[in-house]
């Protein structure tokens, strides 16, 4: 029963986030670029360089 409630709450949160992204016209490319920048900072790159590299990777995709 607890797992069912946990899944229902997670599903509600996902739907809320999806609607917010649609409202703000966020694309999957935007999300991919942000995710790439976050991964690069976790690997030790500074934030400015990570954002620039992620944008460059997006442009070349």
Image (cartoon, rainbow, N blue to C red):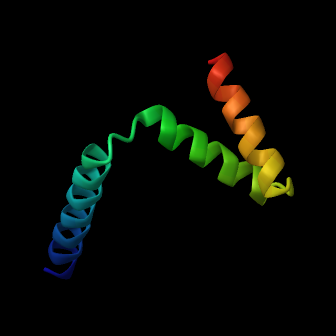
- For the residue pair 32 and 25, the one nearer the viewer reads as 25
Q: Position of residue 58 (x, y in %)?
A: 63, 27
Query: Does residue 51 appear left or right of residue 14 in this picture?
Result: right
**Outermost residue to the top:** 60
Query: Measuring 21% from the left and 61% from the top, which residue is drawn there?
Result: 11
**Outermost residue to the front:** 24
**Outermost residue to the bottom:** 2
Q: Position of residue 47 (x, y in %)?
A: 78, 56
**Would you place residue 30 above or below residue 46 in this image?**
above
Query: Does residue 2 appear left or right of residue 36 in this picture?
Result: left
- For the residue pair 55 and 16, the one nearer the viewer reads as 55
Q: Position of residue 12 (x, y in %)?
A: 18, 65
Q: Position of residue 25 (x, y in %)?
A: 33, 40
Q: Give the quadrant of the N terminus.
A: bottom left
When asked about the image quadrant of residue 55, the answer is top right
Query: Does residue 50 appear left or right of residue 29 in this picture?
Result: right
């Amino acid at each position: 029963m607890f797992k069912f409630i946990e899944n229902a709450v997670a599903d509600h949160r996902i739907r809320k986030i999806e609607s917010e992204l649609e409202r703000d016209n966020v694309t999957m490319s935007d999300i991919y670029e942000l995710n790439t920048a976050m991964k690069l900072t976790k690997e030790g790159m500074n934030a400015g360089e990570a954002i620039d590299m992620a944008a460059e990777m997006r442009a070349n995709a």
